[in-house]
Image: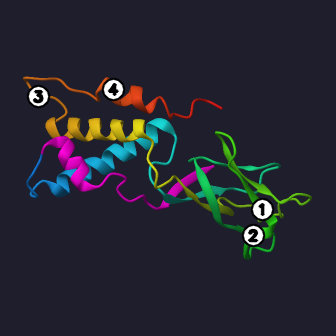
Amino acid sequence: MAYKIITPAEAVIDMPTVKAHLRVDHAFDDSLISAYLFAAMAYAQHYTGNAIGEQEVEVALDGFPCGAISLPLAPASSIVSIIYVDEAAIEQTLASTAYALDNYGLSHWAMSAAGSDWPATYEAANVVRVRYMAGSTTLDPAVKAALMLLVGHLYENRQEATEKKLSSVPIGVNALLDTVKVWGV
């Protein structure tokens, strides 16, 4: 199963808040700070397995599974669409009454509606595509703190390493993100 981000998340922390944290009062570094914030968001999303910020995600499968379809980035808030290629090689959109979202636990799923099965598909790669909304506009305080720490680190250490100082991701970032990380479920 592969997935890709269709509509990426917007910045989850506003620029005045990030600049206050960095103690920056000029505008000429705004684009750099913004780039660091998006890099920090990508790091946090990759590290935790959770969607950071609201975004549209698409999962592609080579056919419908016997059971539910795993939605890799949580939290999933809604299913936008399920599109598939039927046995006659014609693209179809599954009616919204034919599936449901299970977003109760840590793992989120697209499930066929009660009493029904998934339709048969054409045998090819990526014939089933599930689009869904993941993430939230509400940011967990630990994630916000981790993002601020990481942006500060990136802003102060613009090279991977220098002769004076070797720097890596601050240990506090991962410790904070561990509080929301999806551990093997």
Q: Are circles 2 and 1 on residues that touch, CB within 8 Å?
A: yes
N-terminal of the pair, mark 4 or mark 3, is 3
The residue that label 4 is drawn on is 172
Which image quadrant is residue 157 in? top left
Find disc 3 in the rendering and name its residue. Answer: 162
Name the residue that disc number 1 marks.
99
Q: Who's the residue at 12% across and 23% down the image?
A: 165
Q: Is residue 125 left or right of residue 152?
A: right
Q: Is residue 18 visible?
A: yes
Residue 22 magenta: yes
Between circles 2 and 3, the one closer to the viewer is 2
Q: Secondary structure at mark 4?
A: helix
Comparing marks 4 and 1, which lies closer to the viewer? 4
- Decide: marks 4, 3 in contact (CB < 8 A)? no
Amino acid tagged 2: Ser
Q: Residues within 10 Å of mark 3 (few under 14, many from 20)?
A: few
User: Which residue lies at the image location 19% right of the left edge and 57% below the top edge?
Assistant: 31
The residue that label 2 is drawn on is: 96
Tell me which amino acid carries mark 1.
Tyr
Question: Marks 2 and 3, how far apart in space?
Answer: 55 Å
| 169 up-or-down from 3: above or below | above
Relative to 41, is 118 on the left or the right?
right
Q: Magenta segment, which residues?
A: 1-23
